[in-house]
Image (cartoon, rainbow, N blue to C red):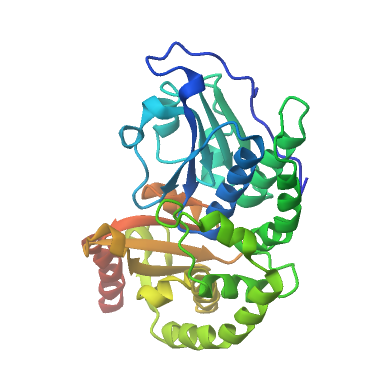
């Protein structure tokens, strides 16, 4: 195991369901993975390697975004056997509904909101398998899960060379985890994260059919060297943005006050580092140790809908805020969508308070 042993919350034995669909031998596994982030993409890579090694099926890959998650009716259910949810469990009610329409649902996730929603939920069907472990990232949970399956005597491995591919990619998975969990324990971890972002890889396997070959070809030392050059440039952008920060009343004051910044497309790609530095500045100003990075999502084609990406220092918990507004994430990192007019009210609360 890469890190701690995952907690398997219920039996992994699938049950045969009397579904009105094709026979299971004609169905493909579907892999829904968190997008657009390296953790979700590398989790999908682990699934790709597993099915490549077994040659059992040709899996269907679907990107799953927090701002526009896949709905059950979006899926070609007659073509799907097992359904994998990697690094994102979808919106409320999704698992309960989809599990009645597919053979089996396998959840590999690490977000606090997923654990709170599903960790002790015994009402899910027996065909739902959960591996939720907040000590690992989605990528390394998937790495361990799929590699362990390949080592199982019950699985016929037709291409044993894939096990070598798993091992060659191990360091990449560890670097992705280190950045996703915001630990920065590995040497030059921030440079790796910066360099990987600079490559601007399209993580949608449908738009980029060579995605998994691209990820497998990555060299950590080359990525780190690239990232070293860009870190200082990115910090200059962050410094300029921090100067323009302003105070907001989270939930019109229900969750206290913190600092926020508006981010363009470039800065939104730096939201994690920007948000954490903003959280530190917010705490220094005697506000909550939370930073809100506010930006528009071009893919939604809706200028009246904003994404609020929260980052916090270690003693703060963002999940009560993100869950209140239909989002989710980790204790120190999460996001949700909010209409522009409602966000203006959060700013107006401050103006009215200052004028009072």
Q: Residue at x 52, y 78 (%)?
A: 281
Along the horizontal axis of the image, is 263 left or right of 340?
right
Viewer-closest of 220 and 165? 165
Viewer-closest of 228 and 208? 208
Residue 195 is situated, as x and y percent measured from the top left of the image, at 59, 75
> Which quarter of the image is occupied by the C terminus?
bottom left
Residue 174 is situated, as x and y percent measured from the top left of the image, at 70, 59
Viewer-closest of 10 and 167? 167
Along the horizontal axis of the image, is 149 left or right of 333?
right
Q: Is residue 298 above or below residue 89?
A: below
Q: Residue at x 48, y 73 (%)?
A: 270
Q: Is residue 286 above or below residue 42?
A: below
**Residue 330 in view:** no
Along the horizontal axis of the image, is 157 left or right of 283?
right
Q: Is residue 100 above or below residue 205?
A: above
Q: Is residue 332 above or below residue 105?
A: below
Displayed quadrant of residue 56: top right
Tally of numbered discs: 0
Viewer-closest of 21 and 55? 55
Residue 243 is situated, as x and y percent measured from the top left of the image, at 43, 87
Residue 299 is situated, as x and y percent measured from the top left of the image, at 30, 60
Q: Residue at x 49, y 46 (%)?
A: 33
**Residue 43 in view:** yes
Displayed quadrant of residue 316: bottom right
> Which quarter of the image is occupied by the N terminus?
top right
Along the horizontal axis of the image, is 125 left or right of 190?
left
């Amino acid at each position: 195991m890469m890190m701690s042993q995952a907690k398997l919350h219920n039996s992994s034995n699938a049950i045969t369901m009397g579904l009105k669909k094709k026979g299971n031998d004609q169905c493909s596994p579907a892999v829904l993975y968190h997008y657009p982030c390296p953790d979700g993409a590398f989790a999908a890579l682990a699934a790709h390697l597993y099915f490549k090694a077994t040659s059992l099926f040709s899996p269907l890959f679907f990107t799953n975004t927090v701002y526009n998650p896949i709905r059950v009716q979006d899926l070609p259910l007659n073509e799907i056997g097992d359904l994998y949810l990697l690094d994102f469990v979808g919106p409320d009610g999704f698992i309960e509904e989809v599990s009645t329409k597919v053979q089996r649902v396998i959840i590999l996730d690490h977000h606090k909101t997923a654990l709170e929603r599903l960790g002790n939920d015994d009402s899910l069907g027996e065909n739902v398998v959960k591996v939720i472990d907040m000590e690992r990232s989605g990528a390394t949970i998937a790495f361990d899960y799929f590699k362990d399956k390949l080592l199982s005597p019950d699985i016929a491995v037709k291409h044993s060379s894939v096990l070598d591919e798993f091992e060659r990619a191990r360091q990449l998975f560890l670097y992705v985890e280190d950045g996703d969990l915001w630990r920065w324990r590995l040497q030059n971890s921030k440079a790796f994260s910066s360099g990987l972002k600079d490559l601007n890889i399209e993580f949608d396997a449908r738009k980029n059919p060579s995605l998994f070959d691209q990820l497998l070809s990555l060299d950590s030392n080359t990525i780190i060297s690239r990232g070293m050059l860009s870190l200082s440039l990115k910090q200059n952008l962050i410094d300029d943005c921090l100067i323009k920060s302003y105070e907001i009343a989270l939930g019109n004051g229900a969750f206290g006050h913190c600092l926020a910044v508006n981010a363009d497309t470039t800065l939104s790609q730096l939201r994690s580092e920007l948000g954490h530095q903003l959280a530190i500045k917010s705490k220094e100003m005697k506000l909550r140790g939370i930073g809100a990075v506010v930006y528009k999502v071009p893919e939604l084609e809706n200028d009246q809908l904003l994404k609020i990406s929260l980052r916090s220092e270690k003693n703060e918990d963002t999940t009560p805020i993100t869950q209140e507004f239909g989002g989710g994430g980790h204790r120190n990192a999460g996001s949700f969508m909010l209409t522009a007019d409602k966000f203006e009210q959060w700013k107006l609360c401050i103006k009215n308070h200052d004028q009072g």
